[in-house]
């Protein structure tokens, strides 16, 4: 049996390939097999990344729509800054404290986005089922 140096995964794959009935002990063949596996893994990772990006994009769109449709009002915080935020965000005590301590408009926008991200937005028209006729 040949001695294979290096990565234990490569050794294990080489020995299992060599012991197979139709196995191929050639390192070039083995390298091509690994390249094919790496390409397959790259494609899978790329597809997963794209799916995650689509989910994040849909969540951002939902948040933007909720912010646009919410009734807005101007408030002044502890530092004298005037900012416009949705009434429901300012009504939440925890978020009101965060807004009152915000120094910049970027911080205010971040606080409003976090509110809609972590507090589920109610859908305008809930799904009606056959058993719920109202």
Image: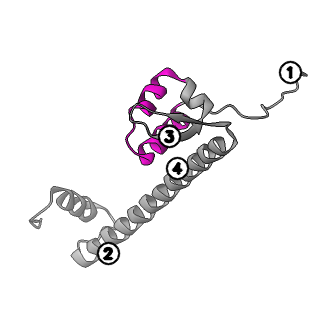
Q: Is residue 98 left or right of residue 13?
A: right
Residue 74: x and y in percent read 58, 37
Label 2: which residue? Answer: 32
Label 3: which residue? Answer: 82
Q: Nearer the N terminus, badge 1 or badge 3?
A: 3
Q: Is residue 108 above or below residue 57?
A: above
- Residue at (52, 41) in percent of width and height: 83
Q: Nearer the viewer, mark 2 or mark 1?
A: 1
Label 4: which residue? Answer: 56
Callout 4–callout 3 Cβ contact below 8 Å: no
Per the rendering, the mark at residue 54 is none
Residue 125: x and y in percent read 79, 34
Marks 4 and 3 sit apart, C-alpha to C-alpha, by 30 Å
Q: Quadrant of residue 75?
A: top right
Q: Nearer the N terminus, badge 4 or badge 1?
A: 4
Given residues 13 and 132, the one toward you in this image is: 132
- Residue at (9, 65) in percent of width and height: 5
């Amino acid at each position: 049996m040949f001695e294979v140096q290096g990565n234990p995964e490569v050794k294990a794959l080489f020995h299992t390939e060599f012991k197979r009935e139709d196995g191929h002990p050639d390192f070039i063949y083995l390298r091509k097999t690994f390249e094919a596996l790496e390409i397959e893994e790259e494609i899978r990772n790329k597809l997963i990344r794209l799916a995650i990006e689509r989910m994040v994009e849909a969540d951002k769109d939902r948040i933007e729509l909720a912010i646009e449709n919410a009734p807005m009002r101007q408030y002044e915080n502890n530092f004298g800054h005037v900012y416009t935020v949705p009434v429901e965000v300012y009504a939440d005590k925890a978020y009101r404290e965060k807004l009152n301590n915000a120094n910049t408009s970027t911080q205010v926008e971040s606080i409003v986005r976090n509110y809609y991200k972590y507090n589920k937005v109610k859908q305008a028209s809930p799904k009606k089922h056959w058993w719920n006729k109202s």
